[in-house]
Image: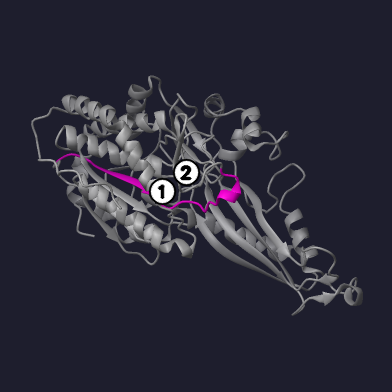
Amino acid sequence: MPSPALARPRPRTDAAPAEGVAAALAYARANGPRFVEELAELVRIPSVGSEPAHAADVRRCAAWLAAHLGSIGLDARLVETAGHPLVRAEWRGAPGRPTLLVYGHYDVQPAELADGWHTPPFEPTIRGDALFGRGASDDKGQLWAHVKAAECWLRAAGRLPLDLVFLFEGEEESGSRGMLEYLARRGPSLGADAAVISDMAMRDARTPAIVLSERGTLGVEVTVHGAPHDLHSGVFGGAVANPVHVLAGLVARLHAADGRVAIPGFYDGVDVPPPAERAALRRAGPGDDEILHDAGVSAGWGERGFSEYERTTLRPSVDVNGIAGGYAGDGVKAVIPTRATAKLSFRLAPGQDPERVERLFRRWVSTVPASGLRVRVKTLFRARPVRVDPRHPAIAAAAGAARDTFGRAPVFVRSGGTLPVAAALSADLGLPVVLMGFALRDDGMHAPDEKMHLPNFHRGVETSIRMMERLARLPFSSTRAARRPRPA
């Protein structure tokens, strides 16, 4: 059940911005323990969006969020999609001020105690200075920091310094289809001037980071079809092609000896930062040893001429996520399988277009020897890369807020991950998108013992409070009349 409703704030206009910030920060510090208790309630809901068995839990989580957002003074409701519902909540009490859109997702990855958790994944537990539980970091803890920042403003100052819209979805872990369709239809009606997404990691526990780019992605499934049924390898072995052999050959040809992807034209358009930016990114990002340590391996691999950090952020890649075919049980089953399948994911650098890469891949597959077997390619998902202008005033506002909270300026980094919604907000709606997370690299996103480092959750609340006030002073309002929000 949602947390008990809080009394709605009475609109107040007498608090100066500086006074409002101070009051909101004091409220955050006084109420921090309650914020964590509420976050634990949210984490307790097993909102695994990709599993039909949890569909009711996902809806319950959306309803919980909407009820809580309504209780702190926002106009909140569920928006139905073909999949899981969106949560939309807004406050429109600052005429002439900018509108900030905060995006997040309440769905989480599957998790079972047997996966290696020390405590049940949906029974949130505090150990030391961290809250453990599936979704604590990805993304419930991070979106909760912004929700609580809004509460701090509304409770302590009686109003927000700008207009605010929250959009939370339940399908981010499976492609964001509902959210992307909603933004395509209703995005302009939101009237947003800037967006913030917190679904990524800081540089370390004391150093905030702002992400300047995210890689895009292309997911495909390749299936090699042979005979209509498995064949006896004694009767037909050496006489007909084996689908597993053909698929293994295709996978083996994906990379050249130097680690580059061997698909002709694959690197066309890839944005290569100038040497000065590459040097700055190397200073800000993790070193090779740190990345290899995080991965639990002793040696790196990949495209020559680039560091491990550059390979995972600046450069594109392709990986086999899974491969299946034939018999893999105990003992022996002497067959030539009827088919073999591999799932591949491309990570695309800024400057690449997933639809073009898909065409290149399909063309390349048609040239790989198949020995008369049928090869089929199925596209599973696409998402565009995102590139952020570090000179935009919204980025400066976020950086200033982080600096005031953490006591040091944020570093500017690039990410190898993918956020489909960030591309839609940036490229389709033309919004400056602030990519600033409060997680840590060892928070275990998608892994057992996922956690949220609570000191940085609280700093996230304070950063969001300060960022709202700084964004409110930016001159976005000149374009608002043309983008006045309409009912969803």
Q: Is residue 315 left or right of residue 186?
A: right
| Disc 2 to disc 1, C-alpha distance | 8 Å
Q: Which residue is mark 1?
A: 44
Q: Residue at x 86, y 70 (%)?
A: 334
Query: In the picture shown, does residue 172 fall above or below 239?
Result: above
Q: Earlier in the sequence, mark 2 or mark 1?
A: 1
The answer to whether the residue labelled 2 contacts the one labelled 1, judged by CB atoms less than 8 Å apart, is: yes
Label 1 CA crowd tier, 10 Å (few <14, some 14–19, many 20+): many
> Of residues 396 and 339, which is closer to you in this image?
339
Residue at image mark 2: 133
Which of the 4 image quarters holds residue 223? bottom right
User: Does 96 sit above or below residue 338?
Assistant: above
**x and y, in percent, of residue 71 in the image:** 21, 47
Q: Where are the magenta residues, as a range? A: 96-117
Amino acid type, callout 1: Arg
Say whether residue 191 is visible: no
Name the residue rendered at 78%, 76% in the picture: 230
- Between 461 and 351, the one nearer to me in the picture: 461
SS for dot 1: helix
Residue closer to the observer: 341 or 194 = 341
User: Could you say which disc has been placed on residue 290 in the image?
Assistant: none
Q: Does the magenta segment cover residue 261? A: no
Q: Residue lying furthest top in this view? A: 407
Q: Nearer the viewer, residue 263 or 196?
A: 196
